[in-house]
Amino acid sequence: MSGTTLQAGRPALPVDPDRDCPLCPRLHDFIASWRAREPGWYNGPVRSFLPPEGEAAVRFLIVGLAPGVRGANRTGRPFTGDYAGELLYSTLKRFGMARGEFEARPDDSLELIGTAITNAVRCVPPDNKPVGAEINTCRSFLVPTIARFPNLKAILTLGSIGHQSTVRALGARVAAVPFKHGARCDVGNIAVFSSYHCSRYNTNTGVLTEEMFVNVFRDVAEFLQQ
């Protein structure tokens, strides 16, 4: 399946929003309310989490939905501060994709190995639910984020919203690459894997088990080892 991230001849877009990004008024106002309520929190668009070796080392990208209000919105690092990060980072370490200790804070010793993590929507949305216009607007940062990794081989999308936005960012049709837990579809030269989101809600309700999540990462690891 064909698909591209950037069209030739167009100027490169910024990979991260400004800290006071005004493009989504509802999200901008929601963050402003949390800055007033919790001035010691990060409270801004969350940047991608990269390995210390930089962009060229990234072969695997994980795309989540959006920062959690008391997770990444509080700490400033994707999947840091809430349950989703506990499951995600323990699984990454299991497959040699991360090292160090995850202590749910951005200054812990955790480092990624050949992996980067980002979100389809960079700002925390009310009730963890971005609306369509916000998802579409923030794709202007997802597109160059994907393009910034010259050696990218695989993407794992967590949840249907992250999956659909990623597919569109790659220039493919969502109908041709539907979301399905444990599935893989090649879009151009990128293998797109998909999983239910590792949220506490999904794990508490049995939508996603640790075994199901680990099996997806096993598929990714086996692909990257080929």
Image (tube, rainbow, N blue to C red):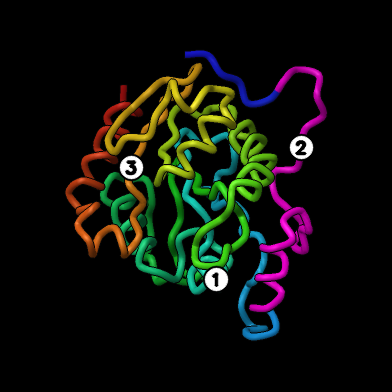
Quadrant (top left, top right, bottom left, bottom right) of the C terminus: top left
Q: Is the magenta region chiefly helix, strand or loop?
A: loop
Residue position for label 3: 195
Residue 157 placement (x, y as % from top left): 42, 40
Tell which tag, 1 or 3, sits nearer the viewer: 3
Residue under numbered circle 2: 13
The answer to whether mark 1 and mark 3 are in CB contact below 8 A is no
Q: Is residue 149 magenta?
A: no
Mark 1–mark 2 distance (CA, rounded to whole Å): 26 Å
Mark 3 residue type: Ser
Residue 82 location (% of width, % of height):
41, 69
Disc 2 residue type? Leu
Q: Which residues are magenta?
A: 7-34
Q: Secondary structure at mark 2?
A: loop
Q: CA distance from mark 1 to mark 3?
A: 24 Å
Q: Is residue 131 left or right of residue 162?
A: right
Q: Indicate the amino acid at tag 1.
A: Thr
User: Is 26 rendered above or below residue 122?
Assistant: below
Q: Is residue 129 above or below residue 127?
A: above
The reply, left or right, for residue 221 in relation to residue 108 is: left
Q: Residue at x 36, y 57 (%)?
A: 89
Considering only order in the chain, which callout, 2 or 1, is on the residue closer to the N terminus?
2
- The residue that appears at 44% across and 65% down in the rendered structure is 109
